[in-house]
Image: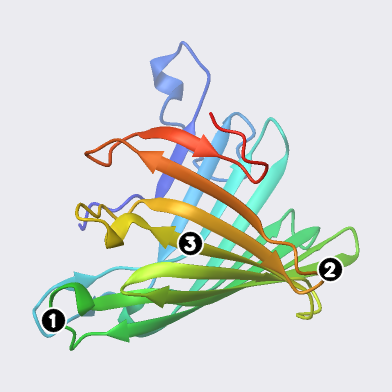
């Protein structure tokens, strides 16, 4: 009715009758790949627009014998807050959590919905668990810093971005990046210079001052 894909699959055959087999599922080993998507209950906004959200998916690669499932939980503005990915049951799992900020009352460039504040991932495989977290800050509606924490949330690497917005023809291109950490005072700096219309990089300078 709504035209959304529920099942997708691929087959290898010269027989047109086998393109649409009677069994279109993860149990049909005659397929090459299979994907099934389930959607959450249709919700209607005040404007009358209907929202249909993919709630979970199942994908199977028959050649590699890999089955992957994804379960998504949504928050404000129908943005995904949690995504849980499992490979071959619980052989490997990945949990992603996203936190956002919103400014629906903003005017012009100050309006934004779904600006990421931080992202956290937890990966478990072979009985081992690793986690990572990234925190984002903004300045003048541009991404200013990305701080990447280790699995204990103690050590970090921070990337700070500088843009060409201060020039007479600012295009929002990153012209300099500084990378620091909490272990030492070393600062790794890379720079990029763009042509007059801000479309292409014409010169790059690495931390050693070498230019390309």
Please say if 188 is above or below 28.
below
Inter-mark Cα distance, 2 to 3: 31 Å
Q: Residue furthest top?
A: 14
Please say if 53 is above or below 81.
above
Say which residue appears at 26% left-offset and 56% top-offset.
167
Number of the front mark, 2 or 3: 3
Q: Is residue 31 left or right of residue 173?
A: right
Q: Give the image quarter of residue 38.
A: bottom left
Using the image as rendered, state which of residue 37 and residue 124 is in the foreground: 124
Residue 35 visible, this orientation: yes
Query: x%, y% of residue 138?
Result: 41, 75
Inter-mark Cα distance, 3 to 1: 25 Å
The residue under label 1 is 107
Precedes in sequence: disc 2 or disc 1: 1
The residue under label 2 is 129
The residue under label 3 is 161
Using the image as rendered, state which of residue 120 and residue 75 is in the foreground: 120
Precedes in sequence: disc 3 or disc 1: 1
Say which residue appears at 91% left-offset and 64% top-offset.
127
Please say if 156 is above or below 99.
above
Using the image as rendered, state which of residue 126 and residue 189 is in the foreground: 189
Inter-mark Cα distance, 2 to 1: 43 Å
Q: Is residue 95 left or right of residue 191?
A: right
Q: Secondary structure at mark 2?
A: strand
Numbered mark located on residue 211 in the image: none
Q: Secondary structure at mark 1?
A: loop
How many neighbours does mark 1 have within 10 angstroms: few (below 14), some (14-19), or many (20 or more)? few
Using the image as rendered, state which of residue 22 and residue 19 is in the foreground: 19
Q: Give the image quarter of residue 193.
A: top left
């Amino acid at each position: 009715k709504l035209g959304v894909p529920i099942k997708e699959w691929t087959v290898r055959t010269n027989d047109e009758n086998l393109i649409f087999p009677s069994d279109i599922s993860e149990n049909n080993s005659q397929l090459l790949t299979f994907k099934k998507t389930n959607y959450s209950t249709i919700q209607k906004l005040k404007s009358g627009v209907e929202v249909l959200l993919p709630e979970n998916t199942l994908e199977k690669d028959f050649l590699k014998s890999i089955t992957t499932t994804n379960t998504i939980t949504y928050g404000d503005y129908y943005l995904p807050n949690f995504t849980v990915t499992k490979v071959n049951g619980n052989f490997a799992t990945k949990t992603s959590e996203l936190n956002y900020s919103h400014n629906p009352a903003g005017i012009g460039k100050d309006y934004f919905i779904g600006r990421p504040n931080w992202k956290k991932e937890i990966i478990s495989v072979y009985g081992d668990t690793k986690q990572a977290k990234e925190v984002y800050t903004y300045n003048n509606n541009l991404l200013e810093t990305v701080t990447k924490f280790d699995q204990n949330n103690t050590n970090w690497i921070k990337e700070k971005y500088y843009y060409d917005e201060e020039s007479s023809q600012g295009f929002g291109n990153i012209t300099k990046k500084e990378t620091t950490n909490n272990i030492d005072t070393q600062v790794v700096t890379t720079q990029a210079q763009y042509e007059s219309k801000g479309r292409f990089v014409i010169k790059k300078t690495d931390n050693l001052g070498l230019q390309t």
